[in-house]
Amino acid sequence: MPAVWCCRTFLYRLDQRQVSLVVLESRHAERDRHDVRAVGAFRNQRRLSRRLVVTHGRPLQEPMLWVADAVAGAVGDALCGQPTCEDVLADLVERVDIGRL
């Protein structure tokens, strides 16, 4: 359940910021369908507006999908005591602590 909560929180925060398009990394047809069902459930629960379009892409066709991995690496380094990369991104990234999973 934590992954669903993370996704819901992530999409909700983007929706609140008036983001109109989110491209999630395609992982496999079955998992993509799970994402689509989850987004539909978030909409039905009124936790996500219909204004936000959520789709899937592949990293080779959508290079911006690599940014999330780079940011995650920078945050991971910072959590291990090496904040150099995260410091560079400080004005561009909002870190949200969701507790331990």
Image (spheres, helix red, strand yellow):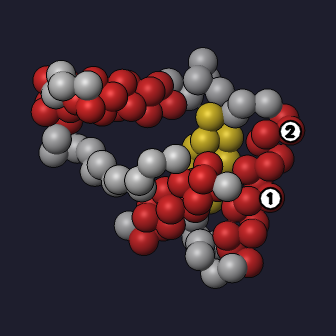
Labelled pair 1, 2 in contact (Cβ < 8 Å) = no
Q: Which residue lies furthest to the right in this view?
A: 30
Q: Residue 89: which quarter of the image?
A: top left
Whole-percent x and y of residue 77?
Answer: 27, 24
Is residue 30 found left or right of 94 in the rendered image? right
Whether residue 18 appears in this view of the structure is no
Amino acid bearing label 1:
Arg
Q: Which of 73 and 11 is in front in this view?
A: 73
Residue 72 lies, with reference to residue 60, above or below; the image says below
Asked where in the image residue 79 lies, by quadrant, the reply is top left
- The total number of labels drawn is 2
Residue at left offset 64%, top offset 81%:
46
Q: Give the residue number, with chain letter if any, for mark 1.
A: 37
Give x and y (percent) for residue 54: 64, 54
Residue corresponding to mark 2:
30
Which of the two labelled residues, at mark 1 and mark 2, occupies the earlier sequence position?
2
Choose between 4 and 13: the one closer to the eye.
4
